[in-house]
Image: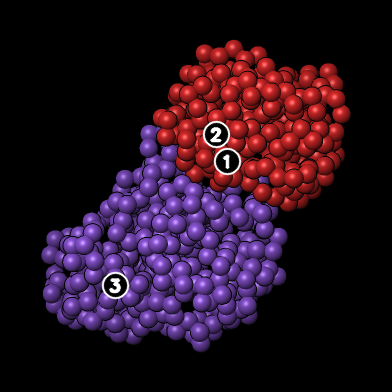
Chain colours: A purple, B red
Amino acid sequence: MSVMGPPDGRGRFGDFGGRFVPEALVPACLELEAAFAAAWADPAFVAEFHETLRLFGGRPTPVTPLPRLSERLGLRVYAKREDLAHTGSHKINNVVGQTLLTRRMGKGRVIAETGAGQHGVATATAAARLGLECTVFMGEVDTRRQELNVFRMELLGARVVPVTSGSRTLKDAVNEALREWVTCVEDTHYCIGSVMGPHPFPWMVREFQRVIGDEARTQLEELGVGVPDVVVACVGGGSNAAGVFAGFADTPARLVGVEAAGGSAIGHGAPGVLHGMRSMLLQDEYGQIEEAQSISAGLDYPGIGPEHAHLAATGRANYVGVSDDEVLAGLTLLSETEGIIPALETAHAVAWLAGAAGNELAAGTTVLINLSGRGDKDVAQVRALLRGER
Amino acid sequence: MTTLDERLGALRDGGRRALVPYLMAGVRPDWGRLLEALVAGGADAIEVGLPFSDPMMDGPVIQEAALAALAAGTTFDSVVAELASLDLGVPLVAMTYCNVVYHYGLERAAGRLREAGVLGAILPDLALEELGEWSAAGDDADLATVLMVAPATPPERVAAVVERSRGFVYAAARMAVTGAADGLGDGAAVVARIRAVSRTPAYVGIGIASPEQARAATRVADGAIVGSALVRRVLDGSSPEEVQSFVRGLREAIDHP
């Protein structure tokens, strides 16, 4: 298996991945696997995907040199600007792909889970564009933390279902979406938001997101930078990281995924099975899943995509954790030096860079940072945090 | 052939329609007493839930029971210790999720369950394609792995699932997670698909809540599984006697059609 090639026939990336779902969902997963494989090999589908991303999604997003941050850190830093994509993050790439596939499969409805609301808003957006019915499951705690995103989804014609089971956050929203999917697989596609879940989702979502890395590779060539020394991205489930890593997996670039210290599935987890996949998970001594703790709702997930678990196991990528305080400092740093307010999730990658500069990253190191999303959604929370209100 | 195959095969050959209630281990401190009440009420086998934090195939009632059991400190070890101390006289089938047994160690988990007198296991998130490692551990320990056939399972796949299922085949009556519902759903059709390819007993579950439904299920199938309706009563504080009486009602409906 080549690095970041397709998984094996059982959907495995090394020891991770697979398809751990109730029998009721197996036929739908098999149907999806066949449909995605056929679509992705069909030039007409691929062309429509890229054209939709261009005309609707705002692609290609630029690669921006970050001179003032570079000077501050003694590095040469370039940013892939997913924050400039439609709906404000890389999430649009995946949902454009999955909604086009939904229509191709003849289904009229999508369901999705969301944590911070980014994937929910993106799904509602892409569904509205194709006239698909859309239901989004969101932990009740998150519906309160991200009230405006709930309203955004509703404006886009989606129905938002607050999830009151378990810890009432992202992992429970995934559980509830899977439970709902059992009842409606016939006419509904589960538009999963990250490189997670049962095969073929981790592979499919990475393929829809690889446009990030493929574009950036070409853009850095055009800028005369070539292959950077380091490619860094934040990781919750890991879709933006998988997308940007995919463009550089076959180069010597060091790949770094930055997890929230309180949600570090690679750093503090153990192998296990959750949400249809075998991966690294935060869990107790009896295999009960533990809740992740993070300043950012989007990284509040106790697992990680199975391909990341594999990349970590083989050493092709490194995964590191940063604290909430470092994240706030990273957000401020990028805002003040470059005029870009990143999402709290994205600020994790900035925070690692700030800490690594002058330590493990020698002066002059070339870095591509994936700016996965913009910070507008977090401004109220950041204001409260910086004023010491919580 | 596992011991569970022998026991449930003998039941079927004797002409008895099986009643299989479900109880979440640790849901109440007196759950061992509740298991005895199920037997006294006329259970032929019992599905014993081992709680998991993220029960993907369960509806609100069994989710609530799982969280209650975990909050009370229930663990794999505490469940097998309690089960080993009971002499119930009917086959026990553990129902839990992959991560519980994967994390415990497949061989170790299968061995501990069997030592505690458990004869079978249902892992609803373990699809046929992922069965390999676990089923080897189960077979070695004489722990029967029971698989599920769903209404959406295509005919060619039914044969493969049924061929690999031990003890009985779980015939899902509907495309839904666990929880009370009306009628028999697709139960009869699913059982017919199982019967077309195998003599393994087929038990109908998912949404079977009332004596009438249990009767209807056992007219078409070899047994009926009743979970959420019973667990709801347990969560609402029914006494062991009341639980026994509920099970007795199911038993009578099955035996006197």
The amino acid beneath tag 1 is Val
Badge 2: how crowded within 10 Å, few (<14), some, or many (20+)? some
Is there any visible trace of residue A351 in the rendered image? Answer: no
Image check: A354 left or right of A178? left
Q: Mark 1 points at which residue?
A: B61
User: How far is disc 2 from disc 1 in space, using C-alphas?
Assistant: 8 Å
Q: In the rendered view of the protein, which quadrant contains the C terminus of chain A?
A: bottom left
Reading the image, the residue beneath label 2 is B235
Taking the spot 42% from the left edge, 43% from the top edge, the residue there is A289
- Distance from disc 3 to disc 1, alpha carbons, whole Å, reads 39 Å
Q: Is residue A377 left or right of residue B223?
A: left
Q: Which mark is residue B76?
A: none
At mark 3, the secondary structure is: helix
Q: Are marks 2 and 1 in contact (CB under 8 Å)?
A: yes
Q: Position of residue B110 (x, y in %)?
A: 54, 26
Badges 2 and 3, same chain: no
User: Residue B161 is drawn in which quadrant?
Assistant: top right
Residue B153 in picture, x, y percent from top left = 73, 49
As drawn, which residue projects farthest toward the bottom?
A: A55
Chain letter of the residue beneath label 2 in the structure image: B
- Residue found 59% across the figure and 47% down from its top: A21
Is residue B235 shown to the viewer in this render? yes
Q: Mark 3 points at which residue?
A: A379
